[in-house]
């Protein structure tokens, strides 16, 4: 009986913590390196980006903020197209994100353009490291 009660209490606590994260509209980062990205800028100035990329940024903001802060995606260390492709596909496959293939393409296009522009030093360093 004691063992069963302990298991129920553990599941109840885990359930409450999980529900709190869902109610906040954000997931709890398990890795402190990921949490550090949440502390950077929450938005960026895209006024000098092409109109299509500015439109894609709105999709990026709307969809990415469903599960985590936009700051996490803006400040992450992804820069190369293959990194963004892998990450966007992963987010598209997460339950509850509701990112369509067309929206995924818009998010990817924005992220790659932004990486080549705003994160140019990181982009260039990663290209060099990859031997591209």
Image (tube, rainbow, N blue to C red):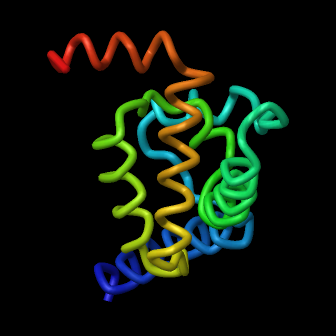
Residue 54: give x, y in percent of width and height: 74, 49
Q: Is residue 110 above or below residue 98?
A: above
- In terms of image quadrants, where is residue 8? bottom left
Query: Residue at the spot x=51%, y=74% of the render?
Result: 102
Please state if 94 lies on the left or on the right of 76 as rendered.
left
Please state if 97 lies on the left or on the right of 49 as rendered.
left
Q: Is residue 28 above or below residue 101?
A: above
**Which quadrant of the rendered structure holds the C terminus?**
top left
**Which quadrant of the rendered structure holds the N terminus?**
bottom left
Query: Residue at the spot x=42%, y=33% of the render?
Result: 78
Query: Residue at the spot x=37%, y=52% of the render?
Result: 87
> 28 or 41, which is in the foreground?
41
> 102 or 91, which is in the foreground?
102
Please state if 60 lies on the left or on the right of 116 as rendered.
right
Residue 13: give x, y in percent of width and height: 53, 70
Total marks in image: 0
């Amino acid at each position: 009986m004691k063992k069963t009660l302990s298991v129920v209490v553990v599941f109840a606590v885990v359930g409450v913590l999980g529900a709190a994260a869902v109610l906040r509209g954000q997931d709890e980062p398990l890795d402190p390196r990921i949490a550090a990205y949440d502390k950077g800028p929450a938005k960026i100035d895209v006024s000098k980006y092409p109109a299509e990329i500015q439109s894609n940024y709105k999709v990026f903001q709307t969809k990415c903020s469903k599960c985590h802060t936009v700051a996490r995606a803006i400040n992450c260390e992804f820069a190369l197209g293959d990194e963004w492709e892998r990450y966007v596909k992963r987010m598209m496959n997460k339950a509850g994100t509701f990112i369509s293939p067309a929206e995924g393409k818009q998010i990817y296009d924005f992220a790659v353009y932004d990486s080549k522009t705003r994160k140019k030093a990181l982009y260039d360093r990663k290209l060099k490291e990859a031997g591209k």
